[in-house]
Image: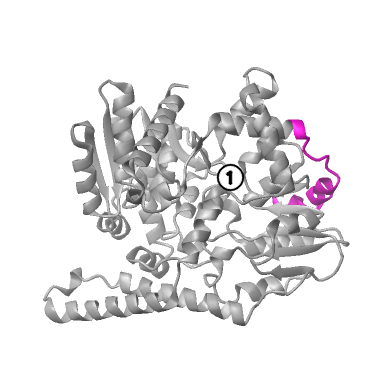
């Protein structure tokens, strides 16, 4: 069996552990090939960790990506030829939109980490983004030609390389697998859909509704989970993890760290002759982190948010997304400009409705200048800070509108009508949900949503049962935190669980 994995600094040891678990479970010949991002160090570590099961490794580091930017390595005709092979139209744009560096011009609601890639992308937006994506498509296509994998596994789909892999795998009918949060506690699934739409859950849900699969072992737990959420709702596990990370941000240590890095940088300039190899970008990013923490504290003092709901008028609740984020850039690439969506809601709502917009806590200090002012100037729109309880706003609202966010799933369970403007896995539930990807249709869709029959408990029992059946428990820190900070028993256990789920998806 040949499997291609996407490795990165945050996912090298974990990926290798999963690979060894795959070998142990299969008990047959297996080769793990790797597409490695993040530098030469990742390739070296992966090669050493994989040992005899390691196959071909490709180093997709910054230098190679800069070559994609600097040179026309491929003709437009060659790329058009690749993309014409049973690939859904718009793949080029989806690859471009998914990458916060080369697609930086498409990020309108947040900051992007400065890098050589970003510098090129903003300097000549008519040249470099097209050149990068064109060369990347040829590169990934050649990799797939060379090894013809039985499956591709990505730890996340959140950039151009991963989305490019997904698009080309789809054209070749190669299983593309990725761990995705179900937004239900700490439960994850190995998804077969690159846009995070929880495709195995959708398939099992449809079968369960026809009584073609047995969900009886999970139905009582599903009932308990739904009633518990409706009584005392809780945010998903990955959001709890993100809150823990933010709580560790301290201004003084970050300032001291930035001063230290700056001093070391200038010392290196004085002591080394070859200054081209001395990277200044970590220094820039270090001071930007200080700036973000300062801006967050400034927001606390000089708040741009309304202190209370404007009146007793019914309202549409719209929670802002983190930006840039895969939930919009990958799952809903046509709706990455959140202000345009809020503006459409303002124009479309019936005359008796206001629009309440709530900021997302991780984005404090990260919005571009003028972002909040633009929202506050829109008619019938009130901007609230992240301290407001999102569950209470859902309960008080006449309607919840989201692009793809978790709040839509929460609203369905809290028995409130929902409009999903972008794509979402929860569209599979059908009840209590309206899909309105075309903003022109919003006036009509909002009226439909307000008169919509809500999701029935029995339907939600089935859906939650299927989540429990198809998913597994995993702390988000395994993917996004310090993997080596977990015990060897914990690492071994989760690696085997993921390996078993990968093989299950390949065989099913």
Secondary structure mostly seen in magenta is helix
Give x and y (percent) for residue 194: 49, 40
Give x and y (percent) for residue 397: 79, 56
Residue 185: quadrant of the picture: top right
Quadrant containing the N terminus in the rendered view: top left
Residue at x 55% of width, y 66% of height: 363
Identify the image's colour scheme: rainbow, by chain, secondary structure or one colour.
one colour
Give x and y (percent) for residue 249: 45, 69
- Closer to the camera, 463 or 35? 463
Q: Give the residues in magenta.
A: 438-458
Residue at x 57% of width, y 28% of height: 469
Q: Is residue 284 left or right of residue 237?
A: left
Compared to 311, does 472 lie above or below? above
Give x and y (percent) for residue 312: 87, 66
Is residue 124 visible in this depiction of the protein?
yes
Is residue 437 visible in this depiction of the protein?
no
Q: Which residue is mark 1?
A: 183
Residue 268: quadrant of the picture: bottom left
Residue at x 80% of width, y 40% of height: 454
Residue at x 52% of width, y 50% of height: 238
- Closer to the camera, 67 or 362? 362
Total numbered labels placed on residues in the image: 1
Q: Is residue 451 magenta?
A: yes
Q: Is residue 360 magenta?
A: no
How crowded pointer 1 is (Cα within 10 Å; few <14, some 14-19, many 20+) is rated as some
Mark 1 lies on a secondary structure that is loop
Compared to 267, does 468 lie above or below? above
């Amino acid at each position: 069996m040949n499997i291609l994995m996407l490795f990165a600094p945050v996912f090298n040891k974990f990926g290798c552990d999963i690979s060894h678990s795959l070998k142990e479970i299969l008990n047959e010949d297996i080769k793990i090939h790797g597409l490695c991002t993040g530098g030469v160090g990742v390739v070296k570590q992966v090669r050493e960790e994989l040992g005899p099961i390691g196959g071909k490794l490709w180093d997709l580091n910054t230098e190679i990506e800069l070559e994609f930017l600097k040179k026309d390595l491929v003709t437009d005709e060659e790329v058009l030829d690749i993309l014409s092979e049973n690939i859904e139209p718009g793949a080029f744009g989806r690859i471009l939109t998914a990458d916060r560096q080369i697609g930086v011009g498409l990020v309108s609601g947040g900051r992007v980490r400065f890098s050589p890639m970003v510098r090129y992308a903003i300097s000549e937006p008519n040249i470099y983004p097209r050149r990068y994506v064109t060369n990347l498509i040829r590169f990934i296509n050649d990799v797939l030609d060379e090894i013809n994998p039985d499956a591709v596994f990505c730890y996340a789909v959140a950039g151009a390389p991963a989305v490019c892999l997904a698009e080309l795998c789809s054209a070749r009918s190669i299983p593309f697998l990725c761990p995705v949060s179900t937004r239900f506690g700490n439960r994850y699934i190995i998804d077969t859909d690159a846009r995070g739409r929880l495709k195995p859950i959708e398939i099992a849900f449809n079968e369960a509704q026809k009584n073609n699969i047995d969900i009886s072992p999970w139905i009582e737990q599903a009932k308990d989970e739904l009633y518990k959420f409706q009584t005392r709702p809780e945010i998903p596990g990955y959001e709890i993890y993100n809150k823990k990370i933010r709580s560790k941000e301290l201004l003084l240590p970050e300032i001291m760290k930035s001063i230290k890095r700056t001093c070391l940088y200038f010392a290196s300039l004085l002591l080394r002759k070859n200054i081209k190899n001395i990277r200044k970008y970590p220094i820039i990013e270090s001071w930007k982190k200080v700036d973000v923490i300062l801006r967050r504290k400034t927001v606390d003092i000089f708040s741009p948010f309304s202190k209370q709901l404007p009146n007793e008028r019914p309202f549409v609740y719209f929670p802002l997304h983190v930006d840039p984020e895969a939930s919009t850039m990958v799952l809903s690439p046509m709706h990455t400009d959140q202000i345009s969506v809020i503006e459409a809601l303002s124009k479309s709502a019936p005359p008796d409705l206001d629009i309440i917009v709530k900021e997302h806590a991780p984005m404090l200090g990260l919005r571009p200048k003028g972002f909040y002012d633009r929202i506050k100037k829109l008619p019938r729109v009130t901007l609230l800070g992240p301290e407001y309880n999102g569950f209470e706003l859902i309960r008080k609202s006449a309607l919840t509108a989201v692009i793809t966010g978790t709040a839509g799933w929460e609203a369905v369970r809290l028995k409130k009508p929902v409009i999903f403007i972008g794509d979402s896995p929860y569209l599979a539930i059908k009840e209590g949900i309206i899909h309105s990807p075309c903003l022109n249709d919003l006036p009509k869709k909002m009226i439909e949503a307000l008169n919509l029959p809500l999701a029935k408990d029995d339907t939600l029992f089935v859906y939650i049962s299927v989540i429990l059946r198809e998913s597994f428990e995993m702390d988000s820190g395994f993917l996004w935190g310090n993997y080596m900070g977990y015990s060897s028993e914990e690492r071994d256990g989760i690696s085997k669980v993921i390996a078993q789920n990968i093989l299950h998806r390949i065989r099913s």
